[in-house]
Amino acid sequence: LEKLGALQWQKVVHGHQGWRLFSCIWLHAGVIHVLANMVSLIFIGIRLEQQFGF
């Protein structure tokens, strides 16, 4: 992901591309990576809702 420019500090600081700090959150290594993250968020979210009553 670094080759794709996920976090290149020179561009963030000197190139005024602050959006790179937030857009790197949505970069994934592939479809399986995205699906694994989504499934884990579902299970964690259900657990948090049960515990805190959201």
Image (cartoon, grey):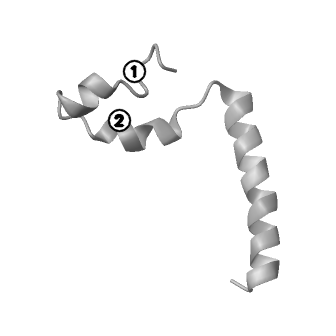
Q: Are marks 2 and 1 in contact (CB under 8 Å)?
A: yes
How far across and down, in percent of the image, does residue 4 sit? 44, 17
Instruction: From the image, tell me which residue sits under label 2.
Output: 20
- Separation of disc 2 and disc 1 at Cα? 8 Å
Instruction: From the image, tell me which residue sits under label 1.
Output: 5
- Tell me if 20 is positioned left or right of 41 in this view: left
* Badge 2 density bin: few <14, some 14–19, many ≥20, Cα 10 Å: some
Q: Identify the residue at horizontal 38%, vertical 40% (top origin).
A: 21
Which amino acid type corresponds to the residue marked 1 in the rendered image?
Gly
- Tell me if 48 is positioned left or right of 3 in this view: right
Residue farthest toward the top in the current orientation of the protein: 3
The image quadrant that residue 28 belongs to is: top right
Whether residue 3 is situated above or below residue 9 in the rendered picture:
above
Mark 2 or mark 1, which has the lower sequence index?
Answer: 1
Whether residue 35 is situated above or below residue 6 in the rendered picture:
below
Q: Identify the residue at horizontal 22%, vertical 33% (top origin).
A: 13
Query: In which quadrant of the rendered image does the C terminus lie?
Result: bottom right
Q: Secondary structure at mark 2?
A: helix
Which amino acid type corresponds to the residue marked 2 in the rendered image?
Arg
Q: Nearer the viewer, residue 28 or 21?
A: 21
* Badge 1 density bin: few <14, some 14–19, many ≥20, Cα 10 Å: few
Q: Identify the residue at horizontal 79%, vertical 69% (top origin).
A: 46
Whether residue 7 is situated above or below residue 36 in the rendered picture:
above
